[in-house]
């Protein structure tokens, strides 16, 4: 099947669209990337998403659900056209949507018991209507219904793509939030460990925007951070955050590390008269330390470290990671035949493919679910002519 994966992460910088060709059944698949497009949000739309995620009203969320449905559909059609294909040649779309709120910690509701919840928006009915392609969406909800935390979901695909017959690998995703997946030799799904480690690009991009009064959305390439010096005292204070010491499963997001968290760090830096370069350098050091601290919960030390996500292109952050993991080799996904930037969008193409084939694709040992489940809901596309 030709399957298009659509993903917008917690950094909310745009939609990643990965067109793939997938063959195989069960847990043995071959995934080939046919095309990839990163379609950025306008500055206005990004600000709207971030504002809505933190303090939006019900009408705000309702309207943005439709707006993002249109945006995701345009990103899908753009990618299909760029690949030289017609929409009717694509079998399926897997859309993660945009997370607006994720509440995996159960809260008691009288008469109903403990309730977990999550909300990803970007109306799949609009995507299916505009493209004519059957669209799978809402991947996290079924895992929560089964008692899990709905995240992370990518460890399943990490296993399919990066498992090694004789070496253990730690896969790190440097997205808005950083997360790790330990793949034991052979990649046995029941032995995988994975969890979020803390803020990543969400923090770096938020600081870059705040420090520049909105002029920059990121420290591109980590150029500013490379010129700065790490403030060890501030880094130590940041590492005292309760989330860092919390045992997995422990998904997190903008609810915990959003604008209020970034504003608090700015105030801490101002009290120390830190230059912008020093604050960004300290943030990179802090992120690497939070990832390295994951070792306390891992069953074994990794023999290789594979890194993906947008943070791969931040040279200051990558230097910090190589330092904390030495002498273990650290390399980007490209070194093992994958794509750092496209991987998460590819992952939702794979999850949609498994949903269409009735294959369970959560990892209960990772999410805490009571059992394996088929992920996602489905909106049919237009009937294809035979």
Image (spheres, helix red, strand yellow):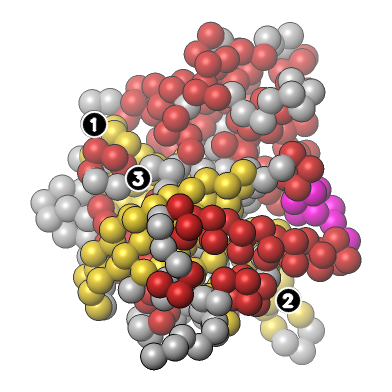
Earlier in the chain: of badge 2 and badge 3, it is 2
Residue 121 drawn above or below residue 262: below
Q: Is residue 231 visible?
A: no
Q: Is residue 14 left or right of residue 188?
A: right
What residue span does the magenta drawing correspond to?
A: 47-57
Distance, label 2 to label 1, CA atoms, is 45 Å
Residue 53 magenta = yes
**Image coordinates for residue 264, horizontal then vertical, percent:** 76, 30
Residue at image mark 3: 339
The majority secondary structure of the magenta stretch comes to: helix
Q: Secondary structure at mark 1?
A: loop
User: Which is closer to the viewer, label 3 or label 1?
Assistant: 3
Q: Nearer the viewer, residue 83 or 116?
A: 83
Q: Secondary structure at mark 3?
A: loop
Q: Residue at x 85, y 61 (%)?
A: 60
Residue at image mark 1: 329
Residue at image mark 2: 108
Pointer 3 with pointer 1, Cβ within 8 A? no
Q: The C terminus lies in which quarter of the figure?
A: bottom left
Q: Secondary structure at mark 2?
A: strand
Q: Is residue 350 left or right of residue 72?
A: left
């Amino acid at each position: 099947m030709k399957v298009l994966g659509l993903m917008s992460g917690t950094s909310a910088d745009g939609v990643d669209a990965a067109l793939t060709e997938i063959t195989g059944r069960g847990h043995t698949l071959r995934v080939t990337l046919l095309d990839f497009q990163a379609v950025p949000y306008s500055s206005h739309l990004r600000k709207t998403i971030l504002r809505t995620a933190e303090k939006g009203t019900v009408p705000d969320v309702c309207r943005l659900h439709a707006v993002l449905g249109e945006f995701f559909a345009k990103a899908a059609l753009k990618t299909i056209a760029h690949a030289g294909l017609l929409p009717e040649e694509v079998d399926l779309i897997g859309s993660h949507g945009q997370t607006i709120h994720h509440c995996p910690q159960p809260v008691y509701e009288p008469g109903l018991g403990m309730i977990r919840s999550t909300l990803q928006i970007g109306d799949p009915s609009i995507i299916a209507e505009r493209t004519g392609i059957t669209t799978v969406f809402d991947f996290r909800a079924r895992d929560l219904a089964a008692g899990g935390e709905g995240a992370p979901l990518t460890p399943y695909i990490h296993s399919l793509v990066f498992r090694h017959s004789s070496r253990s690998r730690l896969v790190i995703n440097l997205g808005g939030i950083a997360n790790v997946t330990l793949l034991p030799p052979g990649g046995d799904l029941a032995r995988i460990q994975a969890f979020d480690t803390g803020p990543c690009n969400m923090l770096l991009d938020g600081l870059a925007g705040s420090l520049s009064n909105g002029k920059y959305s990121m420290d591109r390439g980590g150029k500013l951070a490379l010129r700065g010096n790490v403030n060890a005292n501030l880094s130590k204070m940041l590492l005292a955050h309760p989330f860092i010491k919390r045992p997995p499963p422990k998904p997190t997001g903008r609810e915990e590390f959003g604008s209020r968290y970034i504003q608090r760090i700015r105030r801490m830096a101002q009290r120390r008269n830190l230059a912008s370069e020093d604050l960004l350098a300290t943030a990179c050091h802090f992120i690497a330390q939070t990832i390295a601290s994951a070792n306390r919960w891992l069953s074994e030390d990794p023999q290789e470290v594979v890194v993906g996500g947008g943070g791969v292109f931040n040279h200051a952050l990558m230097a910090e990671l190589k330092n904390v993991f030495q002498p273990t080799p650290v390399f980007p996904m490209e070194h093992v035949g994958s794509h750092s930037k496209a991987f998460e969008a590819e992952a939702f193409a794979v999850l949609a493919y498994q949903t269409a084939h009735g294959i369970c694709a959560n990892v209960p040992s990772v999410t805490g679910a009571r059992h394996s489940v088929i992920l996602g809901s489905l909106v049919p596309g237009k009937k294809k002519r035979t």
